[in-house]
C-alpha cells in the first residue's frame, strides 16, 4: 500500500519535472547529510532538467541552503549520489573543480572579493580558471556588467557599492564563467527593501534566457513569475512540490499551509 | 496627530572645538584647573629634558678633536661627537677592507634602484619587481660582498640577477615615461602586436635567452677579491642579517601558517611542532644552538661559516613568529571568501594566492612590520656569538686608545640609528595600510 503510494508520488514528481525539457542536468538520489548528529537532509530525491527554474522555500533550518550547497560540493553529503551535468560528485577533486566551473552560485552575503575592483572580481575566474586572454575577459565582463546594468561601477571596489549593486556584481561574476546552472542562496535576504527589486529584475531577465536556475528564496512574487516548480522543504524533507500557481493557491500539506499563512 | 515639517533645518557653524587651534587647546589642554596644572607641569618637564639634551648634545658638544682627552679640554660638559665621526666608517662597514667599500655602496645603490620602481607611479608588474628583489638580488649582492670564485650556480644566479635588474630598469622607465610595460613595448617596436600570443611569447623568450647568454659570457671574467665574512661588520652586517631575515621570514611564515592549517595531518603536525619549538625558546638559545650544536650533527668535515648559520637561525626563528601572525590573519578572513573563490572554480593555491593571502596580509601589515622591527633590533644579539654587528662596533669604540671610555655618545648614536630605522619602517607601514585600504571590509 505505502509502496504504491510512494511510487505514485514519484511519478507525479517525474511528470512535473519533465514538463520543461527532457535532458536531466542535476540528479539527486537518496541524498543524506548530517552536521554532527543533526540529520539535515533526509533521503532527498530531486531531478532537474535543463532550462528548468526551481524555487525552494521553507522555514529556516529546513536544509534548503544545505541542499543547494551540496550541488556544487560546498557541503559534502554522506550518503546517496549527486550527478551534475553527467559527472558524479565524489572524492575526486578534479570532478569537483570541474563541476564548480559549470555551476555558478550567488550567496546571501555576496562574497565579493573586497580587495579587488568590480572588474577584477569578474575577470579573475575567466583569466585564472578558463585561461581566457585578459582583453577578452575584460570585454566579456563589461558585457555582463551591462546586463546587470552597472557598467559604470567597473572600477570601483565592492565596499563602495550598495548591497543591491554588490549582489548584481556577484551575479555577473558567476555569469562570466558561462555556467550551465545557477544556484541562488537567498540572494535578497540581506538587502534593504528598495534594493530587492533591482536584483530580482536581473534574475527574471536571466530566467528569460533559459538558464537552469535553483533559487532558495522567500520572494513569493518572484517564485510565481519565474518558477516552473516550487519545492517546500521542512526538517530535511521535501514536503511538497508543485507548479507555482497550484502551490500557492492550493497548498496541500499541513506544514506548507502553515508556512504560507505565516509569510504571505 | 500628524506632523509635517514646514521649515527646513539650516546648517550652523561648527562649535569652537572643531577645527580651530585655540578651540582644540581649550578642550584638550586647559579644560579645567587641574587639567591646566597638569599641562603646565608636563610642559615644564619637557622643557628641562630638552634643554639638558640640547646643551649636552649640540650646544656644548665637540665635533672636531683627535682624542677624547682633547674633547674634555675643549668642553667637558658636552658630548664628544668627534669620536663617533672618526669611527663612522667602522660603524657603517665594520672591518671590511677600506679599498673595497665601493662594493658595499654599489650593493646598496643596486638595491635602491631595484626597488625604486615599487614606489614609482604607473609602473606595471610591481609584484614581479618585489619577487625578483627577494629571489635574485641576494645572489648578486652576496657575490659582490663576498667575492672570490663564482661556482656554476653563482654564475647562473648572478647572470639572472643582472638580466632581471636590466629588465626591471627598462620596464620601470617605459612605465614611468611612456606608459605600458616592457614586453608590450618590445612587441610593438618590432611590429608583432598582431601576431598570435604564442608567437609573441616565443619572441620574448628568445630575446630573454639571448640577453642571458650575452650577460653570462660577459660576467664570466668578472671577479672581485674575496672578503672573508669575519671582516663583515657594522651596520652593513646588521642590514645583511636583517635583510635576509625579513625577505625569507615572510614566505617561510606563510608556508608554515598554511601548513599549520593544512588538512593533511603529517604536514599539520610537522608545521605545528616546528613553530611551537622555535617559539618557545629565546633567540639567543637558537643562535647558540646554530653555532655550537648544529655542527655536531653534521658529517665530519662539513663546515658552514658562522654567518650563514646565524642567518639560517634568524630566518627560521622569525618565520615561526610570522607564521603565527599570518595564521591570525587567515583566521580573520570569513568563510564566504573561500566559498566565493570555490564557486568560480579556483583551486586551493589560487584561492590562497589570489583571494585569501592578499586580504590576510593587508590586515596583518602592522603586525608583520612589528615583527620586522623586532627582527632588526634582535640582530644585535649576534654580538654574543662573536659577530661584529653595529652594536658590537659601537661598544668597541670605548676600548679604542684615543677614545677610551666613550660609552655614552656611542650608545646614544646607536639608539638614534635604530630609532630612525624603526620609526621609518613603522611610518611606512602606516602609509601602506592607508594606500591599500579599499573601503569597507567584509
Image (cartoon, coloured by chain):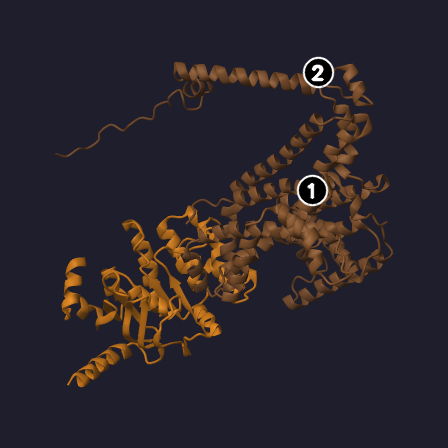
For mark 1, give the secondary structure. helix
B366 or A137: nearer the eye?
B366
> Residue at horizontal 52%, vertical 66%?
B266
* Percent x, y of residue B7: 24, 27
Q: Chain of mark 2?
A: B
Q: Residue furthest left?
A: B1
**For the point 23% across and 81% down, which residue is it?**
A10
Residue toward you, B74 or B279: B279
Q: Residues within 10 Å of mark 2 (few under 14, many from 20)?
A: some
Query: Foreground: A216 or B35?
Result: B35
Question: Residue at the location (43% across, 21% down)?
Answer: B28
Q: Is residue B369 left or right of residue B190?
A: left
Q: Is residue B44 left or right of residue B69?
A: left
Name the secondary structure under disc 2. Answer: loop
Which residue in the structure is indicated by mark 2? B77
Q: Looking at the picture, how far across and down is residue A249, in whole percent?
A: 15, 67
Q: Is residue B195 above or below residue B147?
A: below
Corner quadrant of residue B60: top right
Q: Determine contact: label 1, label 2, CB under 8 Å.
A: no
Residue B257 image offset from top left, x and y in percent: 53, 56
Q: Write down the colour of chain A.
A: orange
Name the residue at 34% across, 67% down: A68
Q: Nearer the viewer, mark 1 or mark 2?
A: 1
Residue marked by disc 1: B384
Chain appearing in brown on the rendered image = B
The answer to whether residue A220 shows anywhere in this view is yes
Residue at mark 1: chain? B
Amino acid at each position: 500500500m505505502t509502496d504504491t503510494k510512494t511510487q505514485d508520488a514519484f511519478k507525479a514528481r517525474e511528470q512535473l519535472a519533465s514538463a520543461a525539457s527532457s535532458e536531466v542536468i542535476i540528479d539527486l538520489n537518496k541524498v543524506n547529510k548530517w552536521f554532527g548528529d543533526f540529520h539535515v537532509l533526509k533521503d532527498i530525491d530531486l531531478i532537474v532538467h535543463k532550462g528548468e527554474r526551481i524555487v525552494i522555500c521553507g522555514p529556516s533550518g529546513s536544509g534548503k541552503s544545505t541542499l543547494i550547497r551540496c550541488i556544487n560540493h560546498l557541503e559534502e553529503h554522506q550518503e546517496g549520489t549527486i550527478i551534475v551535468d553527467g559527472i558524479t560528485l565524489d572524492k575526486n577533486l578534479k570532478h569537483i573543480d570541474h563541476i564548480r566551473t559549470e555551476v555558478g552560485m550567488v550567496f546571501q552575503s555576496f562574497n565579493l572579493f573586497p580587495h579587488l575592483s568590480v572588474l577584477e572580481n569578474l575577470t579573475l575566474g575567466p583569466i585564472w580558471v578558463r585561461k581566457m586572454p585578459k582583453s577578452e575577459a575584460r570585454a566579456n565582463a563589461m558585457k555582463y556588467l551591462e546586463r546587470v546594468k552597472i557598467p559604470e561601477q567597473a572600477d570601483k571596489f565592492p565596499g563602495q557599492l550598495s548591497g543591491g549593486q554588490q549582489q548584481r556584481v556577484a551575479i555577473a561574476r558567476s555569469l562570466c564563467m558561462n555556467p550551465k546552472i545557477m544556484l541562488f542562496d537567498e540572494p535578497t535576504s540581506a538587502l534593504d527593501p528598495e534594493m530587492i527589486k533591482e536584483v530580482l529584475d536581473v534574475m527574471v531577465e536571466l530566467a528569460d534566457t533559459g538558464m537552469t536556475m535553483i533559487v532558495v528564496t522567500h520572494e513569493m512574487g518572484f517564485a510565481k513569475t519565474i518558477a516552473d516548480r516550487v519545492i517546500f522543504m521542512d526538517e530535511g524533507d521535501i514536503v511538497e512540490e508543485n507548479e507555482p500557481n497550484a502551490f500557492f493557491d492550493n497548498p496541500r500539506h499541513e506544514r506548507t499551509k502553515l508556512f504560507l499563512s505565516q509569510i504571505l | 496627530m500628524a506632523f509635517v515639517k514646514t521649515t527646513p533645518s539650516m546648517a550652523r557653524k561648527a562649535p569652537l572645538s572643531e577645527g580651530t587651534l585655540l578651540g582644540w587647546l581649550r578642550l584638550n589642554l586647559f579644560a579645567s584647573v587641574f587639567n591646566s596644572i597638569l599641562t603646565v607641569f608636563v610642559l615644564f618637564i619637557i622643557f628641562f629634558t630638552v634643554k639638558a639634551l640640547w646643551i649636552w648634545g649640540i650646544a656644548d658638544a665637540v665635533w672636531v678633536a683627535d682624542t677624547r682627552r682633547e674633547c674634555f679640554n675643549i668642553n667637558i660638559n658636552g658630548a664628544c661627537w668627534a669620536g663617533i665621526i672618526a669611527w663612522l666608517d667602522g660603524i657603517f662597514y665594520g672591518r671590511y677592507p677600506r679599498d673595497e667599500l665601493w662594493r658595499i655602496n654599489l650593493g646598496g645603490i643596486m638595491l635602491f634602484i631595484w626597488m625604486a620602481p615599487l614606489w614609482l607611479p604607473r609602473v606595471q608588474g610591481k609584484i614581479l619587481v618585489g619577487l625578483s628583489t627577494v629571489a635574485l638580488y641576494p645572489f648578486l649582492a652576496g657575490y659582490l660582498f663576498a667575492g672570490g670564485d663564482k661556482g656554476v650556480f653563482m654564475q647562473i644566479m648572478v647572470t639572472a640577477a643582472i638580466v632581471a635588474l636590466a629588465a626591471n630598469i627598462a620596464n620601470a622607465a617605459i612605465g614611468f615615461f611612456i606608459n605600458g610595460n616592457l614586453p608590450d613595448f618590445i612587441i610593438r617596436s618590432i611590429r608583432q602586436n598582431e601576431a598570435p600570443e604564442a608567437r609573441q611569447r616565443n619572441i620574448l623568450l628568445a630575446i630573454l635567452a639571448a640577453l642571458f647568454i650575452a650577460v653570462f659570457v660577459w660576467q664570466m671574467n668578472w671577479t672581485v677579491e674575496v672578503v672573508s665574512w669575519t671582516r663583515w661588520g657594522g651596520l652593513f652586517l646588521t642590514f645583511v642579517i636583517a635583510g635576509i631575515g625579513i625577505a625569507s621570514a615572510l614566505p617561510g611564515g606563510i608556508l608554515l601558517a598554511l601548513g599549520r592549517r593544512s588538512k593533511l595531518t603529517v604536514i599539520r603536525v610537522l608545521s605545528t611542532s616546528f613553530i611551537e619549538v622555535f617559539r618557545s625558546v629565546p633567540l639567543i638559545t637558537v643562535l647558540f644552538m646554530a653555532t655550537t650544536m648544529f655542527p655536531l650533527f653534521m658529517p665530519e668535515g662539513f663546515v658552514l661559516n658562522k654567518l650563514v648559520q646565524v642567518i639560517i637561525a634568524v630566518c627560521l626563528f622569525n618565520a615561526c613568529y610570522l607564521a603565527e601572525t599570518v595564521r591570525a590573519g587567515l583566521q580573520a578572513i570569513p568563510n564566504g571568501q573561500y566559498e566565493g573563490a570555490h564557486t568560480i572554480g579556483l583551486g586551493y593555491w589560487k584561492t590562497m594566492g589570489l583571494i585569501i593571502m592578499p586580504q590576510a596580509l593587508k590586515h596583518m601589515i602592522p603586525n608583520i612590520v612589528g615583527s620586522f622591527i623586532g627582527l632588526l633590533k634582535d640582530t644585535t644579539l649576534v654580538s654574543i656569538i662573536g659577530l661584529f654587528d653595529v652594536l658590537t662596533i659601537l661598544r668597541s669604540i670605548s676600548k679604542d686608545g684615543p677614545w677610551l671610555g666613550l660609552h655614552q655618545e656611542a650608545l646614544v648614536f646607536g639608539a638614534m640609528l635604530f630609532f630612525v630605522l624603526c620609526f621609518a619602517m613603522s611610518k611606512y607601514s602606516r602609509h601602506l595600510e592607508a594606500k591599500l585600504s579599499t573601503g569597507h571590509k567584509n
